[in-house]
């Protein structure tokens, strides 16, 4: 939550109409609203993170909500708080689909995150194990719920690659790039992507995915375009070595 959250609204041509940044680490902004007007359309953004509860990941688990209204009709509702917002009753059944997640993770040898590889699917523990300091022959291992699903040996020769695993009976393409860990500076990060479709290389081919600072409208637009083509969910993990 130190990075806050942003709401981006695009038109049918994927052009960014507006972007609202919310900085919830400021006490006064943990609960609030924004009123906008775009192309004669009234847009209301409401949020409440005052009592949000968190797990090991960066996103709140409960005790929060984020709601977006277009002309007083709710089109997106995230969270679990049953509240009234300007006379509208909650909870609201949203048709929103979770298509992508980007997260920074830290560790020395083990790196962990949680992931839901399909909409309303089971939440899984993802563990990445990689020892590039003490081992003369570095290797990479990935576990889903403590079960090893893939291993990469001779990592100095295979510092980039991809492999298909099965999660909940669905094929998930795993891409990795640990070049910075092996040959870069000590502060470099590795990048891992889990994509619940075999066509994930279309996203991976974009070089911007290696840069954690790229959070532009065009970047989110690219994920939306692939989702509309039925390419599923993407999890991108930026793994940083901690001292």
Image: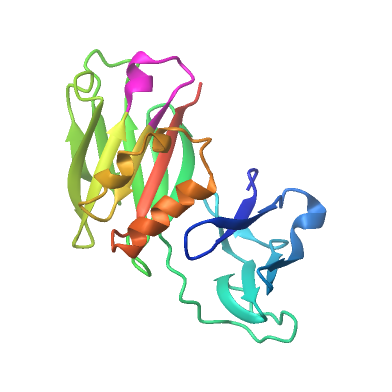
Q: Looking at the image, what colour scheme do you see?
A: rainbow
Q: Is 116 contained in the magenta span? A: no
Residue 116 in view in this figure: no
Quarter assignment of residue 185? top left
Number of numbered labels in the structure image = 0
Residue, x 47% and y 38% (percent of image)? Answer: 105
Q: Camera-side residue: 113 or 202?
A: 202
Q: Is 186 contained in the magenta span? A: yes
Q: Is residue 213 above or below residue 132?
A: below
Q: Is residue 97 above or below residue 115?
A: below
Q: Camera-side residue: 195 or 14?
A: 14
Residue, x 18% and y 62% (percent of image)? Answer: 169
In this image, 7 relative to 191: left or right?
A: right
Residue 49 in view in this figure: yes
Q: Position of residue 197 (x, y in %)?
A: 24, 55
In this image, 206 relative to 219: left or right?
A: left
In this image, 84 relative to 141: left or right?
A: right
Q: Position of residue 108 (x, y in %)?
A: 43, 26
Q: Is residue 146 above or below residue 158?
A: below
In this image, 231 relative to 60: left or right?
A: left
Magenta span covers which residues?
A: 178-190
Q: Position of residue 44 (x, y in %)?
A: 70, 71
Q: Is residue 145 above or below residue 46?
A: above
Residue, x 65% and y 43% (percent of image)? Answer: 2
Q: Position of residue 67 (x, y in %)?
A: 63, 71
């Amino acid at each position: 939550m130190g990075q806050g959250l942003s709401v981006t609204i695009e038109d049918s041509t994927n052009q960014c109409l507006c972007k609202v940044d919310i900085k919830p680490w400021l006490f006064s902004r943990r609960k609030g609203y924004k009123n906008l007007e775009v192309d004669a359309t009234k847009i209301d953004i409401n949020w409440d993170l005052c009592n949000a509860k968190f797990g090991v990941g960066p996103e709140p688990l409960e005790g929060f909500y984020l709601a977006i209204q277009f002309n007083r009709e709710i089109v997106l509702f995230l969270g679990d708080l049953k509240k009234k917002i300007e006379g509208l009753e909650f909870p609201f059944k949203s048709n929103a689909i979770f298509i992508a997640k980007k997260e920074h993770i830290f560790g020395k040898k083990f790196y962990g995150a949680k992931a839901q590889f399909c909409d309303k699917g089971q939440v899984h523990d993802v563990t990445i194990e990689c020892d590039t300091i003490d081992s003369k022959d570095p290797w990479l291992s990935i576990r889903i719920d403590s079960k090893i699903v893939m291993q990469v040996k001779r990592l100095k020769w295979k510092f980039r690659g991809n492999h298909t695993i099965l999660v909940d009976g669905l094929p998930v393409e795993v891409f990795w790039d640990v070049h910075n860990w092996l040959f870069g500076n000590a502060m470099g990060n590795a990048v891992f992507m889990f994509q619940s479709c075999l066509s994930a290389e279309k996203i991976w081919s974009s070089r911007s995915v290696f840069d954690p600072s790229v959070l532009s409208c065009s970047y989110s637009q690219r994920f939306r375009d692939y989702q509309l083509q039925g390419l599923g969910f993407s999890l991108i993990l930026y793994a940083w070595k901690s001292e």
